[in-house]
Image (cartoon, helix red, strand yellow):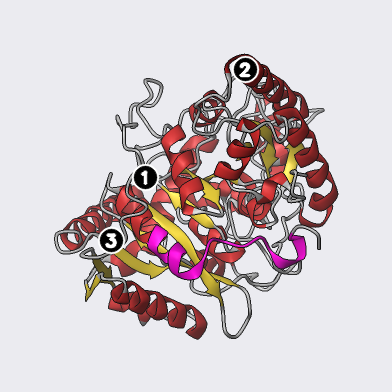
């Protein structure tokens, strides 16, 4: 606990760093307290798969020594407790992707995005639960049990980065990292009522992330304030020689957070508001946010994305094809679960993959195998790539007239466990997020209060031109001034 009795996970980055700099508490004291809170509270939520106590205390002790000798360091995340989705390698920890296939795998190296947070001074508290291999929208497909939504333990936190979102929403961490292939940061951020950012593809290195869809995956932060998310962006963005798709980004994402939205052009997509499955309370919150931004000086206009309706169809061709290719490496020989007692390689391979992968992973592997087979490849994969080009062009055209788009993050609030059993229906949870993974643009979910019907968190999605992520963060900062920063889930607030 801090000097004023607030758990460290419920403080902002700035509050933590000011307390450390003023020597109100040491980083070791903070880290030990944060670990105790996680051990107590995570029994209900199951956000963490592994606590990295040794690494956390080592980082904390190093920072305390630096403070005592030279004063507080200047790292963007110095002293900040942080957690990582369990598809991100951190040397010496298990990286399971929430799959029995990798239950015993120990990382021999550290992912670039994780390493950058550590270089910026972050204190690594642990690895966070997820849908198996990021295949899902609810964290129900984890081989190690689901994560629960801190706002209602009977509901899902979203997925696939459900653990990353829930840990922040419950106040166990101020910030965390997740990955987003079709909405896996933005949808759980909406369900859990926190800020979630998917940067433009190429802004953050993917090296060391267990790949789902290599042309779709991107790493980004969860936080309760826009400034905290921007600080994490400052730490993790930039070119990496180990990832040829990464780009040289030197933007200070905190620089324009105080500029407001006066004169900004913000677009609304009418087709999104009329989409089948969009709940009335989500639509009401989106329209309310648009009105408030207009009152703050933004120019609101309608824009068209003619091919966005084809995004889900294209995604569920491209995604499974890339997943099939990426998951071929888990062959029980080099690494991965190995089923014992087989006398030949073929039977060992088949049994190991059948038992090591869960139902959703097997479903996507089989679908990808079919889509890439002779005679089918030309019928589905090529047209999906053509649709991808059209969707990308739609966004390019839209951003000729606007600086940012405002859209739903998810069609509804968090649903109950087991409520959606049909995989096709589950896929629709990402109906508003998938298109920008296909196009590569940046997007984020910003909480705008709770729904009138359910009383559960709702987020609106902000979408920016490629490599203009500061645009959406600027709009998000204005929404934060209007609605307030994201709140810790009521049952987990300090002192309750």
Residue 106 position within the rendered picture, expressed as x and y whole percent measured from the top left: 69, 25
Observer-nearest of 61 and 431: 61
Specify the label residue 374 is tagged with.
Answer: 1
Residue 447 position within the rendered picture, expressed as x and y whole percent measured from the top left: 51, 65
**Is any atom of residue 244 visible in this view?**
yes
Measure the alpha-carbon separation of dots 1 and 3. 41 Å
Badge 3: residue crowd in 10 Å (few <14, some 14–19, many ≥20) = many
Tag 2 residue: 66
The reply to whether the magenta stretch includes residue 489 is: yes
Badge 1: residue crowd in 10 Å (few <14, some 14–19, many ≥20) = few
Left or right: 267 as drawn, with respect to 420: left
The picture quadrant where one finds residue 139 is bottom right
Sequence-first disc among 3 and 2:
2
Provide the residue span drawn in magenta: 477-493
Tag 3 residue: 404
Label 2 close to label 1 by CB (< 8 Å): no
Badge 2: residue crowd in 10 Å (few <14, some 14–19, many ≥20) = few
Q: Residue at x 55, y 59 (%)?
A: 189
């Amino acid at each position: 606990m801090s000097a004023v009795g607030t758990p460290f996970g419920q403080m902002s980055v700035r509050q933590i760093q000011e307390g450390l700099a003023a020597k109100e508490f040491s980083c070791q004291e903070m880290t030990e307290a944060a670990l105790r809170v996680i051990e107590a509270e995570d029994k209900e939520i199951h956000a963490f798969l592994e606590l990295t106590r040794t690494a956390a205390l080592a980082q904390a002790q190093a920072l305390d020594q630096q403070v005592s000798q030279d004063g507080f360091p200047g790292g963007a995340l110095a002293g900040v407790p942080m957690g990582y989705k369990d598809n991100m390698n951190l040397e010496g920890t298990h990286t399971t992707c929430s799959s029995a296939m990798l239950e015993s795998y120990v990382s021999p190296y550290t992912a670039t995005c994780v390493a950058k947070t550590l270089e910026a001074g972050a204190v690594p508290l642990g690895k966070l639960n997820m849908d198996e291999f990021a295949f899902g929208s609810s964290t129900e497909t984890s081989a190690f049990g689901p994560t629960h939504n801190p706002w209602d333990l009977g509901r899902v936190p979203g997925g696939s980065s459900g653990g990353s979102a829930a840990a922040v929403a419950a106040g166990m961490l101020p910030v965390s990292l997740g990955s987003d292939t079709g909405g896996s940061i933005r949808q759980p951020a909406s369900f859990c009522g926190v800020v979630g950012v998917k940067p433009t593809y190429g802004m953050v290195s993917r090296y060391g992330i267990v790949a789902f869809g290599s042309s779709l995956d991107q790493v980004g932060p969860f936080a309760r304030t826009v400034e905290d998310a921007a600080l994490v962006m400052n730490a993790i963005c930039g070119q990496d020689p180990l990832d040829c798709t990464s780009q040289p980004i030197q933007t200070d994402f905190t620089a324009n957070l105080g500029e407001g939205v006066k004169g900004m052009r913000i677009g609304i997509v009418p087709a999104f508001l009329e989409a089948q499955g969009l709940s009335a309370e989500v639509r009401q919150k989106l329209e309310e946010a648009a009105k408030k931004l207009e009152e703050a000086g933004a120019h609101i206009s309608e824009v068209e994305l003619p091919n966005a309706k084809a995004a889900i169809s294209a995604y569920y061709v491209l995604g499974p094809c890339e997943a099939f290719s990426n998951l071929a490496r888990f062959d029980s020989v080099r690494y991965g679960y190995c089923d014992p007692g087989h006398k030949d390689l073929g039977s060992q391979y088949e049994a190991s993959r059948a038992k090591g992968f869960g139902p959703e992973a097997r479903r996507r592997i089989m679908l990808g195998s079919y889509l890439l087979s002779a005679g089918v490849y030309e019928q589905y994969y090529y047209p999906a790539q053509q649709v991808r080009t059209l969707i990308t062009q739609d966004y390019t055209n839209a951003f000729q007239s606007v600086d940012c788009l405002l859209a739903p993050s998810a069609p509804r609030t968090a649903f109950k466990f087991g409520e959606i059993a049909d995989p096709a229906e589950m896929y629709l949870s990402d109906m508003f997020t998938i298109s920008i993974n296909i196009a590569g643009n940046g997007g984020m979910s910003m909480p705008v209060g709770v729904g009138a019907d359910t009383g559960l968190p709702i987020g609106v999605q902000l979408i920016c031109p490629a490599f203009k992520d500061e645009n959406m963060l600027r709009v998000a900062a204005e929404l934060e001034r209007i609605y307030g920063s994201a709140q810790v889930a009521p049952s987990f607030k300090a002192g309750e």
